[in-house]
Image (tube, grey):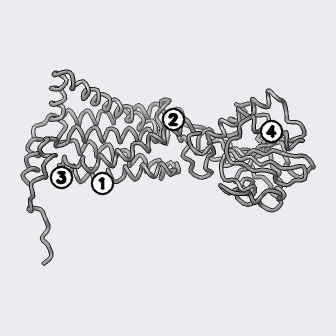
Amino acid sequence: MITPRTVSLFLSLLTVLANAAVLTLVGLGLLARVSPSARATLARLREAVRPSAPALAWLVAITATLGSLYFSEVAHFVPCRLCWYQRIGMYPLAVILAVAALRQDAGVWRYAVPLALVAMPISAYHYALEWFPSLDAGACDPSAPCTLVWFRELGFVTLPFMALSAFALIVTLLLLGRDASPSEIAAPPPVSFEHRPKETR
Amino acid sequence: MSRRSDRAAGRSGRPLLLPVLLVGAFALAGVVAVLATQESAEPPASKSAAFSLAVVSGTPLPALPEQGPDPALGRPAPSLEGVAFNGQTVRIGADGRPKAIVFLAHWCPHCQAEVPTVQAWLDANGRPEGVDLYSVATAIDPSRPNYPPAAWLDREGWSVPVVVDGDGRAARAYGLTGFPYWVFVGADGTVVERRAGRIPSGELQSILERLGG
């Protein structure tokens, strides 16, 4: 039988895998600064990931979104104020990245990464609050307190930690797969009217 | 259009390693989660004692404002009668003795920290002179962590009498706005002070001494 405990453990295991992926990629990125072979590995990895980066990031966002909806709508874990702020970051990503994946638009990182970067400190603060409740007001709100820890899987994975990990993986994947030729970033993109809707006459 | 088709072309012929890895990760996490939680299905909790209703009489107090003077000061505190988790009847009413009543939620980390602190203070100093100490277990919710409250308070060796407030009516009657929630009642049965949030042991001691003195 699938219980909220099963789902929380399932998502926690995925969270750990996401953490491993982020740490590996960030470590490789740092190593690439000093090691030519790491640089070559990173370049190969970027080539391999680039076409699928928006789709992979979407997979992370949709998993996080569906997980969040499961916990609030099925398991009836009432979202607190900080949960809602994180939802404001995650839910649009599930839509934006879906469109980007369908259009194979690697340039989506310019819109998606800022959204995730704004939400990440909120997740980090919420996670810190779970360990140190006195960072907040010193009292629990009777209805939906941000200090309430619905579950703590594997000793450390909680809901805001899941959100933080998902945002971090989305940022990492999108930056890894960005269409990052420096000239393209520096110069404005070529103007094309090919897709532009005809103006009303 | 050309950029898009270029990318689409670049994709063709790519190995299936990435999708296989992803499906594998999801499947592995799913199987482990199902297997690990199969036997941990919690038995249905007995609801009778955990959700006993308190009997409240008297005029309810207004909610404690976040700032400014407390409008409940000097007003008679409603009396409460309920049962403890062990079925014993507990009555908190005007009996000519000052009282400190703490409202606790089992899922609130501040309450989880307050209970052992107060208990340690009681163990070190004994019961406060001339003041009766009571607690009310409220906001009881089986879906929230650290349920049932009876097991939690038992684990903490909580020696303060408990009134079970199964539907939160006692908390509402006392104008609760946050956990833990302290209400100090004078010997004449009127509210002397109300506080939402933890009270450091030293401060609690001075409040109780003032109340008892």
Q: Quadrant of the C terminus of chain B?
A: top right
Query: Which residue is tagged 3?
Result: A103
Q: Which type of secondary structure does the marked residue at label 1 adopt?
A: helix
x and y, in percent, of residue B184 in the image? 80, 48
Rounded to the nearest whole Å, what is the CA distance between mark 1 and mark 2?
Answer: 29 Å
Quarter of the figure with residue B175: bottom right
x and y, in percent, of residue A24 in the image? 29, 27
Q: Which type of secondary structure does the marked residue at label 3 adopt?
A: helix
Pick out the residue farthest to the right: B96
Q: In the image, is A158 to the left or to the right of B179?
A: left
Rounded to the nearest whole Å, what is the CA distance between mark 2 and mark 4?
Answer: 37 Å
Q: Nearer the viewer, mark 4 or mark 3?
A: 4
Mark 4 in CB contact with mark 1 (< 8 angstroms):
no
Query: Which residue is tagged 4?
Result: B206
Q: What number is the disc on residue A95? A: 1
Q: Quadrant of the N terminus of chain B?
A: bottom left
Q: What number is the disc on residue A186? A: none
Q: Residue at x 68, y 44 (%)?
A: B180
Query: Which residue is tagged 2?
Result: A152
Q: Residue at x 87, y 53 (%)?
A: B189
Q: Looking at the picture, which amino acid does disc 1 mark?
A: Val
Q: Earlier in the sequence, mark 2 or mark 3?
A: 3
Can residue A186 be seen? yes
Q: Residues within 10 Å of mark 3 (few under 14, many from 20)?
A: some
Q: Residues within 10 Å of mark 1 (few under 14, many from 20)?
A: some
